[in-house]
Image (cartoon, rainbow, N blue to C red):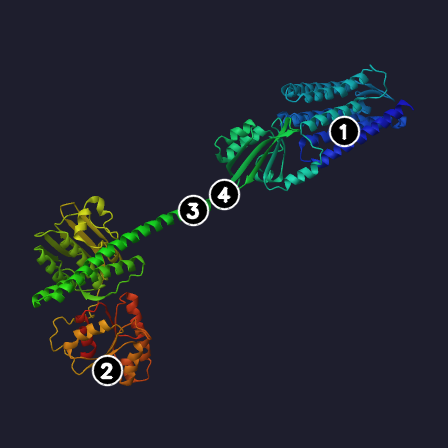
Amino acid sequence: MSPEIIFFSVSLLICYVIAYILGLFWFGDKRNRQVLSMFVLGVGVLVWIFLTAITHFVNPAYFGFINGLRFVMVCVIPFFTTWFILQFIKSPLINKRWFQLILVFAPTIDIMAMITNPIHQLYFIEVTFPRTTPGPLFWAHAAMAYGIALLMFIVLLQHVIRNAKSHPLIILTVVGLMIPYALNMLYTFEILPFNSDFAPIGYCATLLLFIYVSYRFHIINIRNPSLFLSTIDSISDIIVIFNESRVILDVNLSTHAVFSDFPLTAKHPEGKSFFNYLEKIVTQTEPENLLDILKAGHDVEGECTVETKNEELRTYTITHQAVFENSKSCSGYVLVMKDVSAFRKTLNEIENQNHELSELKTQAEQASTAKGMFLSRMSHEMRTPLNAIIGMTAIGETAATIEKKDYALGKINVVSSHLLGVINDVLDISKIEAGKFELYEAPFDFSLLIKRVVDIANVQASDKQHVFSVHYDEKIPKLLIGDEQRLAQVITNLLSNAMKFTTKYGSISLEAALIEDNKDMCKLQVKVSDTGIGISRDKMARLFESFEQGGDDSRKYGGTGLGLAICRSLVELMGGKVWVESEFGEGSDFYFTVQLLHADGTMSLSETNEGATAYDNHFEGFSIIFAEDNDINREIVLEQLKHTMLSIDCANNGKEAVSMFTGSPEKYSMILMDVQMPEMDGLEATRCIRALDMPRAATIPIVAITADVFREDVDQCIAAGMNDHIGKPVDIGKVIEIIHKYIKN
């Protein structure tokens, strides 16, 4: 067998092996630029070997053409080699624009000089089989090729020196680069008696050595890389794979999506550059030195917050771990970043909810404590007057004289009024805190309101021998629109406190002034001053809160501590405010303002029945129905109305009241109706009466007499068809006034 046939067969076998290996790499790891440069170099070598083999069998007439094609590969192979070497060692030179232009234009000029040789014959003096006679341009080409080879040898040698200690196999790359150029020099200078250029075969050895080193460096992967890449691409976590030199080998698609503004596989594939990039976008890390640990290449687990290109903050857990091959030497590193933003958000929501629950628990505990304090305070405030009522009742029962009995009854009356005040305060503050308190606004005479309040206060002032003065601004309009009862309640409460907390022979003053007036509304200011115990500054901030009083000394004066809280709420409902100026031991000045509408001059006030004559209180000849299920309440009303000579028929429930009225509708002039009764309540009974088909059913006055005294209770009574409302405990004077209103008028 001739040497030419052997050379051709070996060349084809080598081409087949190189094609298989390059195809394996290319289709398995297209994204790796080192694999791409190796693939391009391998294809060039394959074509070069094939053309070199053909030159041994081609017809001499076509030798020039085939040899020209072969020399095209001879011109470009050095530059393909340069590209591959620089990619292999990750040289920044490959990214320089001027160097990229040299890699393109230098072989182009060389090829143009070779192609145009028939014109100038400076590249080849003579082209004959099997050798050509080189010309001046060929030696220029050889100088350039060997110059580039020498440069790459120096660059590669520097890289080998830096990494040989940790990776001894890298020395093979220097050997691989020397082989083809050594064979080419032997062929070019005819040192060996061969008619064929074995440089392409040398390049095969170069490729095989570089492939082996790249595989050991994990630059490329032939263990089913396609499956491996598909697997990591399908993972939503960020995955970055480094070799043992901390150079990025590969990243998955999630990494490209999140860090698209960082050229992971283009210009800065070094791990250090990537971590420097992370430093710029990471806002918080746990532990604090997480990035320093990552740069040092140590195994670490942590968490970081990243500001993405959309200025969105995302939280990632980070795991960085070395990978060991055969449990011996480190072959690389893996960085995994898992997006836990949704989990962290949920965790924060849970923590916030736990915090809120903790606060609610604290509030509940405080409310429970306040409830306990409230019950304790109310127990004291209610049991004290009840004890007096029970005690005075016992004294009255055993009293031997009328004077003693009258004394006991008088005390019972005073204490009962106090107990009623406590109950009213509790009901008022409950309504206020529930947000269901409403004012009942109607025209009233403000001067008469002040007169009634002063008349009551004069009794208290007289008992303690206070000097009580009143200053009334005559500019205040006579008729105003507002809740007269609640306004009187505020003034009475402030005067009552002034009387209570001022010792004997003190001074109390009440001032009412107009401070603002316009067409529709006026603003009044009321001031209550005393020379009492005063209030310390640290107590004034909480003075208008529920269950608060002026100080420790005030406990001996009693009270629920609700009055001022109620006053503040009522004043605020009237569009005003309340405040205090005081010094401990030097008395107090309480102020409040309210806004009241002007009453139309055509409005008239209902005249009160104060001072009604005995004749007015006699209702002889009139009959009413009194529906009440409680025997004691019936007895009290019947006994207190006995002197009026009113004929009263009693019903135990609403059903009986309807039956009595239906039987004699013309007999009765009025119905007093309790609301809470068995069988049929007062509201239902009223609706039944109003629905009767008889003239008197629509006109007979029906008045509620009930312990349901809230505004909505009154509204329900009116909505059911009642004409008026009387609250319990019953004020018999109020009852007589209502009876007179609907019977005599």
Whole-Å distance between the Cαs marked 2 and 3?
Answer: 66 Å
Asked if residue 79 can be seen in this view, the reply is: no
Please state which of the two labelled residues, at mark 4 or mark 3, is closer to the viewer.
Answer: 3
Taking 114 as reference, is 633 left or right?
left
Q: Which mark is residue 44?
A: 1
User: Looking at numbered disc 3 in the image, what kind of residue is underneath it?
Assistant: Asn
Residue 288: x %, y % from top left: 47, 32
State if disc 1 and disc 4 touch (CB < 8 Å).
no
In three-dimensional space, the C-alpha distance between marks 1 and 2, rounded to whole angstroms, equals: 125 Å
Q: Secondary structure at mark 3?
A: helix
Neighbourhood count class around disc 4 (C-alpha, 10 Å): few under 14, some 14–19, many 20 upward: some
Find residue 393 and report its image quarter.
Answer: bottom left
Q: Which residue is mark 3?
A: 354
Q: Nearer the viewer, residue 698 or 277?
A: 698
Q: Position of residue 648 (x, y in %)?
A: 21, 79
Q: Residues within 10 Å of mark 3 (few under 14, many from 20)?
A: few
User: In what quadrant of the picture does the N terminus appear?
Assistant: top right
Earlier-in-chain disc, 2 versus 4:
4
